[in-house]
Amino acid sequence: MPEPQKYRMLASSVDVIFADVAQLGPACIVVLNAKYFLKNGGHVVISIISITGTASPETVFAQEVHYLRK
């Protein structure tokens, strides 16, 4: 698991975070980084695809959306 608190002082806050999610689980990394780097009123754009072949695109999408809503 990344630890953005260890490198937060090296980067400034951003208006937008873009993430290309290609497997189950990376939405948690996006959320963690957003807590440390996203400006108030900023946005997150996530491209959710399934390239692993182990799960259907619909499954990957549904699980990541479920995580983000929590």
Image (spheres, rainbow, N blue to C red):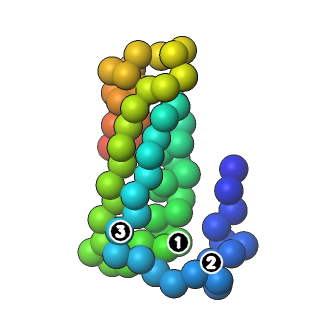
Q: Secondary structure at mark 3?
A: strand
Which residue is identified by label 1? 36
Residue at the extreme front: 51
Which residue is identified by label 2? 8
Quadrant including the C terminus = top left
The one nearer the camera, 55 or 6, is 55
Can see residue 52? yes
Residue 47 lies, in percent from the top left, at 36, 43
Mark found first going from the N terminus, 3 or 2: 2
Q: Amino acid at mark 2?
A: Arg
Residue at the extreme left: 41
Q: Residues within 10 Å of mark 3 (few under 14, many from 20)?
A: some
Which residue is identified by label 3? 16
Q: Secondary structure at mark 1?
A: helix
Q: For this view, does 69 lie left or right of residue 13? A: left
Residue 3 lies, in percent from the top left, at 69, 62
Q: For this view, does 50 lie left or right of residue 58? A: right
> Could you give the CA–CA distance between mark 3 and mark 2, rounded to whole angstroms?
16 Å
